[in-house]
Image: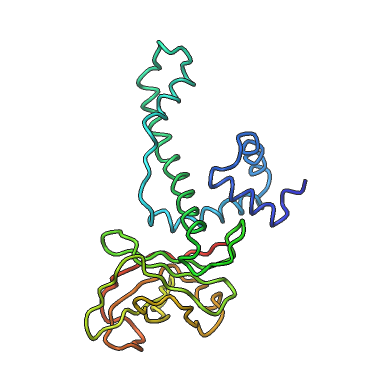
């Protein structure tokens, strides 16, 4: 089997990063990483895709029963307990690893299972190539989603919670590139979810955009934000 076929490699790398790959396959894929820079890049790409979403979801603590099961594997004799020092080391090692894996699974599952929130209605087994944004307020509550197919020319904005726009102002959506000035995208219409024209392919609009943000503006056609961002979040590509 040619593991470096792009489509197959992308699926394997995704399963590896998400932690859904079986134990035997995972060992083989780990060995393959040590032999192929192409595989290493595929795994790194999946980490990069998911990393911006980790901060957009709540932390998930491993269940207490997990430590009991680990103890049972280390010390099968139910009457004997492994040395506390060993368990402490395991907890320190597993906590970030499990948190990372659970975070990745939750982030991807959230987008995949709630695709309608991003305007992705024709879902198949895999998420279509898309740009996705989840914007939060200062308290860390998700308030708004943005979604657009990679080669589409429209996007969908959906409010997850009411947005109190001050009288005489509009909620303006901005694309924030890693370098350079904010780029105006559209005004957020409260209660509406119809596709919004982008004026070009989403690939041209969102490529190179690290984050999205919303500010309240007096001028509906403001070229630059004049006030603070009230919502912000990562802009992530899924393909």
- Which quadrant of the figure has residue 153? bottom right
Q: Position of 187 compared to 227: left or right?
A: right
Q: How many marks?
A: 0
Relative vertical location of residue 49 with respect to residue 144 in this rendering, above or below: above
Q: Position of 134 compared to 165: left or right?
A: right
The structure residue drawn at horizontal position 46% and vertical position 78%, both measured from the top left corner, is 194
Q: Quadrant of the C terminus?
A: bottom right
Q: Position of residue 220 (x, y in %)?
A: 33, 87
- Which quadrant of the figure has residue 97? top left
Q: Nearer the viewer, residue 156 or 205?
A: 156
Q: Nearer the viewer, residue 30 or 115?
A: 115
The structure residue drawn at horizontal position 30% and vertical position 76%, both measured from the top left corner, is 215
Q: Position of residue 184 (x, y in %)?
A: 40, 81
Relative vertical location of residue 95 with respect to residue 12 in this rendering, above or below: above
Q: Position of 63 compared to 170: left or right?
A: right
Q: Position of residue 58 (x, y in %)?
A: 35, 50
> Which colour style is shown?
rainbow
Q: Nearer the viewer, residue 87 or 123?
A: 123
Relative vertical location of residue 48 with respect to residue 64 in this rendering, above or below: below
Q: Position of 220 compared to 131: left or right?
A: left
Q: Position of residue 133 (x, y in %)?
A: 44, 66
Q: Residue furthest right?
A: 1
The structure residue drawn at horizontal position 43% and vertical position 35%, both measured from the top left corner, is 94
- Which quadrant of the figure has residue 80? top left
């Amino acid at each position: 089997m040619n593991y470096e076929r792009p489509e197959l490699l992308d699926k394997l790398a995704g399963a590896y990063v998400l932690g859904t790959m079986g134990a035997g396959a995972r060992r083989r894929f780990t060995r393959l990483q040590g032999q192929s820079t192409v595989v290493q890049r595929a795994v790194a790409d999946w980490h990069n895709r998911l990393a911006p979403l980790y901060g957009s979801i709540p932390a998930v603590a491993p269940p207490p029963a997990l430590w009991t099961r680990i103890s049972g594997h280390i010390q099968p004799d139910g009457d004997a307990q492994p040395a506390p020092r060993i368990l402490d080391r395991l907890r320190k090692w597993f906590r970030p690893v499990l948190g990372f894996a659970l975070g990745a699974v939750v982030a991807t599952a959230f987008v995949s299972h709630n695709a309608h929130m991003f305007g992705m209605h024709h879902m198949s087994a895999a998420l279509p190539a898309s740009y996705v944004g989840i914007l939060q307020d200062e308290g860390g509550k998700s308030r708004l989603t943005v979604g657009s197919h990679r080669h589409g020319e429209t996007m969908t904005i959906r409010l997850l919670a009411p947005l109190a726009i001050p009288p005489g102002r509009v909620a303006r959506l901005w694309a924030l590139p890693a370098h350079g000035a904010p780029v105006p995208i559209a005004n957020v219409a409260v209660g509406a979810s119809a596709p919004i024209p982008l004026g070009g392919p989403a690939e041209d609009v969102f490529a190179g955009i690290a984050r999205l943000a919303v500010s309240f503006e007096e001028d509906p056609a403001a070229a630059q934000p004049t006030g603070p961002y009230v919502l912000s979040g990562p802009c992530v590509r899924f393909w």
